[in-house]
Image: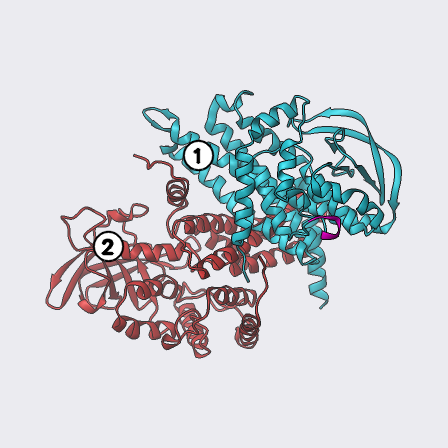
Amino acid sequence: MDLDLDAGDVAFRDEVRDWLTEHVPARPLPSMDTAEGFAAHREWEATLAGARLSAVSWPAEYGGRDASLLRWVLFEEEYYAAGAPGRVSQNGIFLLAPTLFAHGTDEQRKRLLPRMARGEDIWAQAWSEPEAGSDLAAIRSSAVRTDGGWLLSGQKTWSSRATFADRGFGLFRTDPDAERHRGLTYFLFDLRAEGVTIRPIPQLDGEPGFAEIFLDGVFVPDADVLGEVHNGWRVAMSTASNERGLSLRSPGRFRAAADRLVRLWRAVGAPSDTALRDRVVDAWIGAQAYRLYTFGTVTRLAEGGGLGAESSVNKLFWSELDVALHETALDLLGAEGELTGRWLDGYLFSLAGPIYAGTNEIQRNVVAERLLGLPKGT
Amino acid sequence: MKFTLSPEQRQFAASIGDLLSGSDVPGLARRWGAGQPDLATWRRLADLGVTGLAVPERWDGLAAHPVDLVVAFEELGRHAVPGPLVESVAAVPTLLVELGDDALAGRWLPALSAGTTVATLAAPPHLPYALDADLADPVLLVVDGTLSLARTTTALSSVDATRRLFAVDGAGVLASGPAVTAAAGRAFDAGTLACAAQLVGAGQALLERATDYAKQRSQFGRPIGAFQAVKHQLADVLVGLELARPLVYGAAVAVADRSATAGRDCSAAKVAAGRAAYQAARTALQVHGAVGYTQEYDLGLWLTKVRALLSAWGTATTHRARVAAALRDAATTAARR
């Protein structure tokens, strides 16, 4: 058992570090949940792609570097330590792309992935509906057969940045008579197509980061069905496992935040306040635990293991850690803690963590039923 | 990088687990707590090499990797094995090896490795009493940079009946000075690490027992494990233990590398392992209900051990302060660079 990096890993890490030092914008970009910020973040994606750093774990033919999972983790550590911009393309790269690799056709991968890597198509997820949140299989939006494709109708909601994005992906009911987990199909669609109406929903922080998507007979060609018709549930679940697991929340994000928290504590923490000091320590320990846990997962996956329900363990841990870490920062700031700024932005963002990508209640059910073998509830 | 156990380490854990599963450890623990300790199981653990893990080969030990030590202690905690294990297997060998005094090392290490004697240790303020001092040779005392042999004065009673603690007095100085302080520091880290591993193992046992019980016990016409109020508590216990374990193994790697962060990492491991194990204990008792609160039922062996181990080898307050000091120093170093 060791935590040593080989020479190739070190060289990769150093190259990433040097590139980021040179290229990360000196001033933070405006919020990606605004039109101006979205455009700036899209431009940053193109800059990353120019150095083949936007999706390092992808095959080279799609714009990646065939990087191992370990190198991806190292990339993320460097990325967040450098204070680089948030990834406006994350829903495409971390949610849709793994599904395209697993279930897409060669034609789809060649057509969609390079554009995604360069930020030319920014993808929005379209999972939830007004009556289908945690109970995702309750979705009602439908697709009916037409010449050469399908016509999509219905309403999707809580779609991040759909107001500014180019394309969407989600599940639609193609067989209304089938059992509810069957008869669903995974579609890719154009957010600017005829019949699409998008209504922004301001989030807790005031920015229009959410949107509702209304679809009224939106045409989607057969080429934009992902996986088999009526098999969308299984296809989508492989995406969900990626989102909750390694892909979306890398340890580098929390390690960088914990290091910033320690610096804040050194700068403003009262030496006599051991209660706050202990919370800083606990947040740092949590980030360290998640990092080491991830190295264990990376080793197991490299040895051919799978992720499965363990991704729910990840998600529960990082989402609670992220809230605790930011709460501690705001409390350290004392009376200044209510003022808008980077820590408050991070705090508001962290509050969404226990909700999205499958609520933490659903994750606890998954852990209890699949990892502990407890009986399903009725 | 390879941050998983090797097949040999898994096999080692399984061998210890098999031995202990067949040894009626709960019966042993009850006799131990009633004042009838018995070292037969200890000698069988010695046959597997457990007692020689931290002893160098020249003193008839295995000079094993600290990860192997953690593997063993996780199993010992899982089975709630009584006795001065942390002291005799981890801390005292580390102390004697780090001290570099061949006469002292040669005097005790071969017998400790063979499991024919056990050692114990007091080192106030974090370790004020010596566990099972009436069984041990040597009984050591470290105070302010002085290592002494000790004699027992008063027997004390612990929440964990198997922890037979004794107040001790110095009875003959063996060594003193900065070398003792440094060696005692390494020994404290080794003991802290072993204790953290024991806590993870004990927490795992509590989770397994509570989960099994929740599957069997029915109320309102269904197993209580089908209720989310029960499920979610057990899921949280699993998450706590799964995320504490890598800290324990990471600290073992840091100790093996003699990394400058080894002390910090052992402390972080004890904080996380203690919290996770205690959450497991509280949850396991709650899931079992009244039967878990009885002395007859074995669950109490783990419940009381976890509570005792939170106080032993440095409290959470002590270890958080150590992590905080390390983070403050590291930040200072980084800022100067």
Residue farthest right in this picture: B172
Query: Above or below — where is B241 with respect to A6?
Result: above
Asked if residue A322 lies left or right of residue A365, the reply is right
Classify residue B217 by image quadrant: top left
Closer-to-camera residue (B196/A21): B196
Name the residue tied to disc 1.
B211
Q: Amino acid at mark 1?
A: Thr
Rendering coords of residue A353 (x, y %): 44, 51
Name the residue tied to disc 2.
A155
Q: Residue B60 magenta-drawn?
A: yes
Colouring style: by chain
Tell me what hue chain B is rendered in: cyan
Asked if residue A197 lies left or right of residue B90, the reply is left
Range of the magenta residues?
B57-61
Residue at 56% from the left image edge and 26% from the top image edge: B300
Q: Main secondary structure of the magenta part?
A: helix
Asked if residue A252 lies left or right of residue B35, the reply is left
Rendering coords of residue A357 (x, y %): 38, 52
Rendering coords of residue A334 (x, y %): 62, 49
Q: Amino acid at mark 2?
A: Gln
